[in-house]
């Protein structure tokens, strides 16, 4: 029997090493590139509602979590006892009940009235098999989905007892009931033929009095075949009072289960592309606990921490539940509130319109998400064309000023960076730029323009299930890196970056600085080699469009007359 007192898993004192997320890696990479672009000329001139853990009674330290019984190799349909004792309701044998809709196939066991399997028919896992939402390894340790968790002790083991069961007349639901004479439990599940929405009810009484309880999903949820799946799993709820989506990782429950209570639009558990959440009645107070479940057998038998949840808190819990894909169209049809499950984060203002554009192009023109990304990228680059040409003109003018800048540098040659005259040198250079209408950072504009779209595309490929499993030419999944031994897209991107950089007007005559700038494609290539193919395709397409635009600009732009360095004045200044 599960309860909140033994709901935690002991992890020992071993410290865990957390790797940097891809977002942080990319941000660091771009900051490094920005530092190279900005600081190189100067260096070469001089030699991220705090929740409190639920209190644990003293018994929690003495009582170890009890493990649910393993599923039997073969089961039979259970039948009620022939002559049950007064007030007692149970089945004689263990059995399973299969409920099928157009979209899912659920297998329930009357031992505990829990879910043993939940398959989404229209989706495949990373191995190409029908997508199983129940993580068997985690469920065997933390409890199968829709197990009951109590705040207080009860007279029977609710999650291992044999329930009497009956299938609904339409074949789309199943009802369970158990009683030992004191404790009475009723659980019912009913589904719709063409929807991921279900009606779930649980009622517990002891000696005729309501017993507060929770329904749980712990030990893993969703597509566990994807790399680092545990890091993509969270508990989630939308707080109506704060109008804010709250996402919790497993680490918040390191010291024990963490409780949140309030008026929520929805609450449950999610991974990258799928969710299992309840939708309480408007204004109802809902409680959700976050757990930290250690599960072995996911990554080479090493224990991995998963975020688990239980939701409810009343003696009678009656809720609508959505268990399915985080597809915006599907979520909107089930309940508009669920659209908030697809969280585009800080880049919502750009990422959501970008996703809608890619989705529209795929549906109406391309019929392929890879080509849709290519088309949208081309459109974006042509929308930014005036800004790019303005930047290229600034770079051309800056190139023509190199002789005068070289003269100024020669004038102050050998001066230490701490020398007060170093400020005079910088002032002269900036005055020269200002006089000729040149922005020294103008050469960075083409890359800076791409960065917001880069992060927006990254977010789209991270949260939009439409991109999951979308293929393009040799790429099998645009949301994942290429599966080839040698990844073609990142290599092609490095080559195109070198070509574009060679074609771009140089803003310095110093060969050593030019060599440093040639490192930029390698830095980008290193960063892009392990990211999703769709993201690399976006950047590669932008490079190819940039090369075409650069060719056009180089043929049509009128080069400014080269400036002549004031040699005599430079020599005179050097003597001073």
Image (cartoon, rainbow, N blue to C red):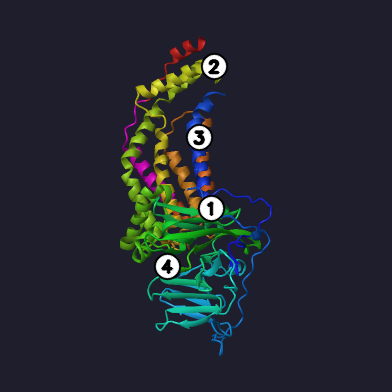
Q: Which residue is mark 1?
A: 530
Residue 355 drawn at (x, y percent): 37, 55
Residue 105: give its label. Answer: none
Q: Are marks 4 and 2 in contact (CB under 8 Å)?
A: no
Q: Is residue 424 above or below residue 31?
A: above
Q: Is residue 227 visible?
A: no
Q: Residue furthest bottom?
A: 82
User: Mark 4 or mark 2: which comes first in sequence?
Assistant: 4
User: Mark 2 or mark 1: which comes first in sequence?
Assistant: 2
Mark toward the viewer: 4 or 3? 4
Q: Is residue 282 visible?
A: yes
Q: Which residue is mark 3?
A: 35
Q: Which residue is mark 2?
A: 419
- Overall secondary structure of the magenta stretch? helix
In this rendering, position of residue 313 left or right of residue 551:
right
User: Mark 4 or mark 1: which comes first in sequence?
Assistant: 4
| Neighbour tally class for label 4: few under 14, some 14-19, many 20 plus, Cα within 10 Å | some
| Neighbour tally class for label 3: few under 14, some 14-19, many 20 plus, Cα within 10 Å | few
Q: Which residue is mark 4?
A: 319
Q: Are marks 4 and 3 in contact (CB under 8 Å)?
A: no
């Amino acid at each position: 029997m599960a309860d909140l007192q033994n709901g935690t898993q002991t992890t020992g004192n071993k410290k865990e090493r957390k790797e940097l997320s891809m977002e942080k890696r990319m941000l660091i990479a771009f900051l490094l590139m920005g530092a190279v672009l900005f600081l190189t000329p100067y260096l070469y001139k001089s030699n991220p509602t705090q929740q409190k853990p639920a209190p644990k009674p003293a018994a929690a330290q003495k009582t170890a979590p009890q493990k649910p019984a393993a599923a039997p190799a073969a089961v039979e349909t259970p039948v009620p006892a022939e002559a049950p004792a007064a007030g007692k309701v149970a089945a004689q044998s263990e059995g399973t009940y299969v409920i099928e809709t157009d979209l899912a196939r659920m297998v329930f066991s009357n031992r505990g009235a829990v879910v043993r399997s939940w398959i989404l028919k229209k989706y495949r896992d990373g191995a190409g098999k029908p997508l199983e939402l129940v993580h068997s390894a985690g469920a065997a340790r933390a409890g199968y989905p829709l197990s009951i968790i109590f705040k207080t002790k009860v007279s029977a083991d609710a999650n291992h007892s044999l329930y009497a069961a009956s299938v609904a007349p339409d074949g789309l639901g199943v009802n369970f009931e158990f009683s030992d004479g004191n404790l009475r439990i009723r659980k019912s599940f009913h589904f719709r033929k063409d929807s991921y929405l279900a009606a779930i009810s649980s009622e517990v009484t002891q000696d005729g009095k309501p017993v507060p309880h929770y329904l749980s999903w712990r030990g893993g949820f969703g597509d566990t075949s994807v790399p680092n799946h545990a890091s993509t799993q969270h508990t989630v709820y939308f707080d109506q009072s704060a109008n804010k989506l709250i996402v919790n990782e497993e680490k918040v429950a390191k010291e024990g289960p963490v409780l949140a209570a309030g008026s929520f639009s929805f609450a449950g558990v999610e991974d990258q592309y799928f969710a299992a959440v309840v939708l309480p009645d408007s204004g109802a107070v809902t409680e959700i606990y976050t757990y930290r479940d250690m599960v072995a057998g996911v990554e080479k038998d090493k224990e991995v921490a998963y975020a688990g949840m239980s939701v409810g808190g009343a003696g009678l819990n009656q809720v609508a539940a959505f268990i399915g894909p985080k597809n915006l169209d599907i979520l909107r049809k089930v309940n508009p509130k669920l659209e908030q499950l697809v969280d585009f984060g800080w880049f919502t203002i750009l990422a959501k319109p970008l996703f809608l554009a890619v989705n529209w192009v795929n549906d109406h023109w391309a019929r392929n998400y890879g080509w849709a990304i290519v088309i949208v990228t081309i459109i974006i680059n042509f929308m930014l064309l005036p800004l790019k040409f303005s930047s290229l003109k600034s770079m051309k003018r800056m190139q023509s000023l190199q002789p005068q800048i070289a003269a100024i540098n020669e004038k102050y040659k050998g001066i230490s960076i701490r020398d007060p005259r170093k400020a005079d040198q910088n002032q002269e250079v900036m005055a020269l730029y200002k006089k000729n209408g040149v922005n020294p950072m103008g050469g960075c504009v083409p890359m800076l323009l791409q960065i917001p779209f880069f992060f927006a595309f990254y977010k789209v490929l991270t949260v939009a299930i439409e991109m999951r499993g979308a293929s393009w030419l040799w790429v099998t999944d645009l949301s994942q890196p290429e599966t080839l031994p040698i990844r073609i897209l990142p290599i092609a991107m490095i080559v195109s970056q070198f070509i574009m950089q060679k074609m771009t007007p140089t803003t310095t005559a110093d060969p050593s600085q030019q060599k440093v700038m040639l490192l930029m494609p390698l830095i980008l290539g290193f960063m892009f080699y392990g990211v999703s193919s769709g993201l690399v395709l976006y950047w590669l397409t932008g490079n190819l469009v940039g090369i075409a635009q650069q060719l056009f600009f180089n043929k049509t732009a009128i080069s400014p007359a080269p400036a002549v360095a004031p040699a005599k004045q430079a020599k005179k200044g050097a003597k001073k």
